[in-house]
Image: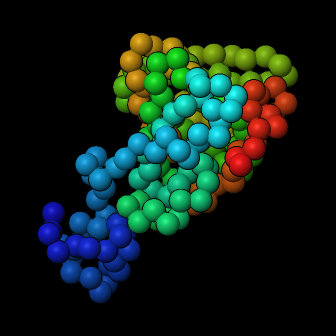
C-alpha cells in the first residue's frame, strides 16, 4: 500500500485521485481495526455476560453513531463489522425492524436464537456457517464454546435504526445512558 495515503478510508474520489492512493483508501487491514468494548457496554447493566466488542469496517452497524470514526469506510448501502463474543458471552434478544442482519462465523461457535411468542428456536453455528435474519424477527446470540467467537455482522442498510428490545428481552427498559 502507498505510504502517501492520508485520507480517511473510502473518502478519495475515483475520478480525481491517484489510482494507487484511491485503491489503498478502499482497503481496511486487521492491523488498523480495534475491538470496541465500549459501544455496547450499556448492555452490561443486565449482566457481565453481555460484554462484547464490535470491530467496525464499513459504517457503524446499529450500535450507535460512529460516523466520526475515520478508520472505517462510510456506508453506501450496507454495514459490515466483526463481533467478538467471549466464552459464555451473549447478545441479548433484540429486533431490527428496518433491515435484515446476517451473521457469518469466522472462529468459535455461536448459538443463535430466533424468538416468537415466548418460544426460542436455537441453532449452533460454527466455522463458515451463516444465518440471515429478516427484518422484524427477534434474535439473540450466545457463545457456547470455550474460546472467543468471532463473526461477521452484515446489516443491509446504510444507516440502520437502533434495535429495540422486546418485553421478553433482559434488555427491555435498559437505556443507553
Relative to 153, residue 23 above or below: below
Colouring scheme applied when the structure was drawn: rainbow
Relative to 93, residue 155 above or below: below
Relative to 175, residue 108 above or below: above
Is residue 139 at least partly visible in the picture?
no
Residue 91 or residue 80, whichever sits in front:
91
Residue at 69% from the left image edge and 54% from the top image edge: 161
Splitting the image into 4 quarters, where does residue 169 fall?
Answer: top right
- Which quarter of the figure is the N terminus placed in? bottom left
Residue 156 or residue 113, whichever sits in front:
113
Where residue 139 appears, x then y in whole percent? Answer: 67, 30
Where residue 59 appears, x then y in whole percent? Answer: 50, 58
Splitting the image into 4 quarters, where does residue 17 fall?
Answer: bottom left
Compared across the picture, whether 151 is left or right of 95 comes to: left
Where residue 102 appears, x then y in whole percent? Answer: 54, 38
Residue at 17% from the left image edge and 74% from the top image edge: 4
Where residue 99 appears, x then y in whole percent? Answer: 66, 48
Q: Number of callouts in the render?
A: 0
Work out which residue is located at the far bottom of the displayed protein and give it: 16
Residue 50 or residue 78, whichever sits in front:
50
Residue at 63% from the left image edge and 32% from the top image edge: 44
Relative to 84, residue 127 above or below: above
Amino acid at each position: 500500500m502507498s505510504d502517501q495515503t492520508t485520507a480517511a478510508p473510502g473518502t478519495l474520489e475515483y475520478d480525481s485521485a491517484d489510482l494507487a492512493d484511491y485503491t489503498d483508501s478502499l482497503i481496511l487491514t486487521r492491523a488498523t481495526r480495534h475491538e470496541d468494548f465500549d459501544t455496547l457496554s450499556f448492555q452490561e447493566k443486565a449482566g457481565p455476560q453481555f460484554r462484547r466488542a464490535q470491530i467496525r469496517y464499513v459504517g457503524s452497524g446499529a450500535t450507535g453513531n460512529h460516523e466520526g470514526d475515520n478508520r472505517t469506510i462510510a456506508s453506501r448501502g450496507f454495514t459490515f463489522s466483526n463481533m467478538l463474543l467471549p466464552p459464555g458471552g451473549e447478545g441479548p434478544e433484540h429486533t431490527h425492524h428496518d433491515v435484515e442482519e446476517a451473521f457469518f462465523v469466522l472462529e468459535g461457535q455461536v448459538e443463535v436464537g430466533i424468538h416468537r411468542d415466548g418460544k426460542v428456536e436455537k441453532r449452533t453455528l460454527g466455522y463458515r456457517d451463516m444465518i440471515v435474519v429478516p427484518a422484524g424477527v427477534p434474535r439473540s446470540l450466545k457463545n457456547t464454546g470455550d474460546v472467543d467467537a468471532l463473526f461477521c455482522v452484515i446489516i443491509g442498510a446504510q444507516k440502520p435504526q437502533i434495535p429495540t428490545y422486546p418485553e421478553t428481552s433482559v434488555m427491555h427498559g435498559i437505556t443507553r445512558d
